[in-house]
Amino acid sequence: MLGGGKEFPGTWQRALLPMSLLDALEAGPNHGYALGQILEARGFSPIKGATLYPALVKLEAAGYMDSTWEDGDGAPGRKVYTLTGIGRGHLAAQRELWSFFQDAVLRP
């Protein structure tokens, strides 16, 4: 939840989830649950696994991220996602489009 008791509308969250996941991965490799936590810290409502993991699968299928399996020490293993070069290029293009969109919406 954002400050002042405001929340991002669900439609915004769904639309921005792919770009936000790529942005969260830009800082370095991470696993799905941690990515969801990062987005929650940024103001997203809790992201259900049924929403998060299919989005990650689609991003990986598009070549925007890779994954490796990390064994857990006494805990279950997990997939760790890494942003690819193609993903970095896509993220840069999406940020540029977002900037144009933001300018159009916020124009006085």
Image (cartoon, rainbow, N blue to C red):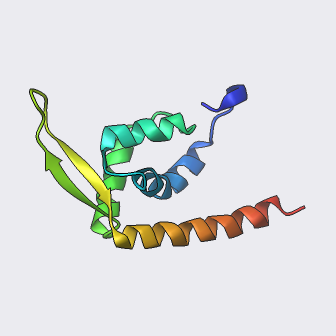
Quadrant housing residue 101: bottom right
Q: On screen, 79 above or below 92? A: above
Q: Position of residue 26 (x, y in %)?
A: 42, 56
Figure check: 39 above or below 55 = above
Query: Left of 92 or right of it: where is 61?
Result: left
Quarter-wise, where is residue 98 in the image? bottom right
The residue at the point 14 percent across, 49 percent down is 69
Q: How many marks overall?
A: 0
93 left or right of 103 in image: left
**On the image, which quarter does residue 71 sit in?**
top left
Q: Residue at x 31, y 51 (%)?
A: 29
| Nearer-the-camera pick, 76 or 12 | 76
Return the residue nearer the eye: 66 or 57: 66
Q: Quadrant of the N terminus?
A: top right
Please say whether residue 47 is visible from this viewpoint. no
Q: Which residue is painted at 53% across and 54% down in the image?
A: 16
Q: Position of residue 41 (x, y in %)?
A: 52, 34
Mark yes or no: residue 38 visible: yes
